[in-house]
Image (cartoon, grey):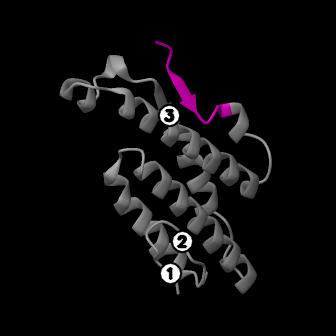
Amino acid sequence: MPLTFYPHPDDTQKGTLDERVEVLMDAADRYRASILDVASRQESLVKKIGLPKDQTAAFHWDEIAQVLRQIRELPEGNKEERIHKATLLSKLAEIYEVLRAAKMPKLEAVRLALISEAGHLGGGTKVGGGGAQVA
């Protein structure tokens, strides 16, 4: 069975940072759908545990790490820059929420850390999924 990687590295290397975050969101949605589809088709307990040979999809964590690093390196000189950075961090938190729904519950801590970081920047944006609001 072939292994599909989300997102494709070529897709995340082009465009603005905002566009790259959108590509990551789309890839996270497709990855979640793939994982949940496989999980719904498996009958036995062993298959529900998920053996490596049964894996059909993988997420490129390097791509999301690069985007996170670039977001954190953005300047915070004025209010508009801080708001833009907070918005991007909030969108990244939404991506982690989608990935968490793909049977990765440990990502909740990362999502909450991103929401907190966005809140410290004064983003004032609402993050979906958990209903947490950044002040």
Find out whether the residues at labels 1 and 2 contact each other: C-beta distance under 8 Å: yes
What type is the residue that disc 3 sits on? Ser
Q: Nearer the viewer, residue 51 or 79?
A: 51
| Residue located 46% across and 49% down the image | 99
Q: Name which residue type carries label 2.
A: Val
- Above-or-below relation of 60 to 56: below
User: Residue at (75%, 81%) from the top-left corner?
Assistant: 80
Alpha-carbon distance for marks 2 and 3?
24 Å
Q: CA distance from mark 3 to mark 1?
A: 29 Å
Amino acid at circle 1: Gln
Of badges 3 and 1, nearer the viewer stands 3
Q: Which residues are magenta?
A: 1-9
Residue at image mark 1: 133
Q: Secondary structure at mark 1?
A: loop
Q: Which residue is mark 3?
A: 34
| Residue 53, percent from left and from top | 34, 16
